[in-house]
Image (spheres, grey):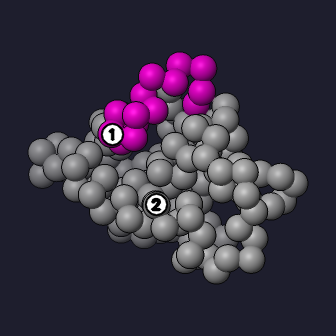
Amino acid sequence: MYFIEGRPRHRAIVEEYVSNLMVSLNIHRFTSRAVNIEFLKTLDGDAQGLCNGDKQVALISINKSIPFLRQMQALAHEMVHAKQFLRGELGHKGSDLRWQGKSAAKVAYIDQPWEVEAYRMERDLFLDCFPFDLYN
């Protein structure tokens, strides 16, 4: 289940895309869990997207000030994080993010296991799931 908040450009395309991403990430059957996606004018630190969550809900924020297709690639990246939270692969212990129960606090951002997976998957997810036929 997912909810889209804010005013994304091409809402129907975004809805189709999110649905496709959820199927591809195999989280589409989580009826008691939710992905909330909000489109905001800007994000702190000029981030393109952010995701936070737990096993019940993932909250994704997407920066609307970047080009639409870049927003969609960022959404693919953040949806990987949503999958990680909802499946319990990524979690919190206090303010410490944990991967499969282990702290990665001293690991550089780009080497954090959840980021490695998200960066590895984002391009293929975008190309496989974005409804290009609706965008033209």
Q: Residue at x 40, y 54 (%)?
A: 76
Which residue corresponds to mark 1? 24
Quarter of the image holding residue 55?
top right
Residue 110 location (% of width, % of height): 55, 77
Q: How many marks?
A: 2
Under mark 2, the amino acid is Ala
Q: Helix or strand or loop: what does disc 2 sit on?
A: helix
Q: Is residue 31 magenta?
A: yes
Name above or below for residue 4 compared with residue 107: above
On the question of residue 12 being in view, the answer is no
Start and end of the magenta stretch? 21-34
Q: Marks 2/1: CA distance?
A: 14 Å
Sequence-wise, the earlier of marks 2 and 1 is 1
Which residue corresponds to mark 2? 118
**Name of the residue lying farthest toward the top:** 31
**Could you tell me what secondary structure mostly forms the magenta stretch?**
loop
Under mark 1, the amino acid is Ser
**Which label was assigned to residue 66?**
none
Question: For this view, does 85 lie left or right of residue 71?
Answer: right
Q: Helix or strand or loop: what does disc 1 sit on?
A: helix
Q: Residue at x 73, y 58 (%)?
A: 102
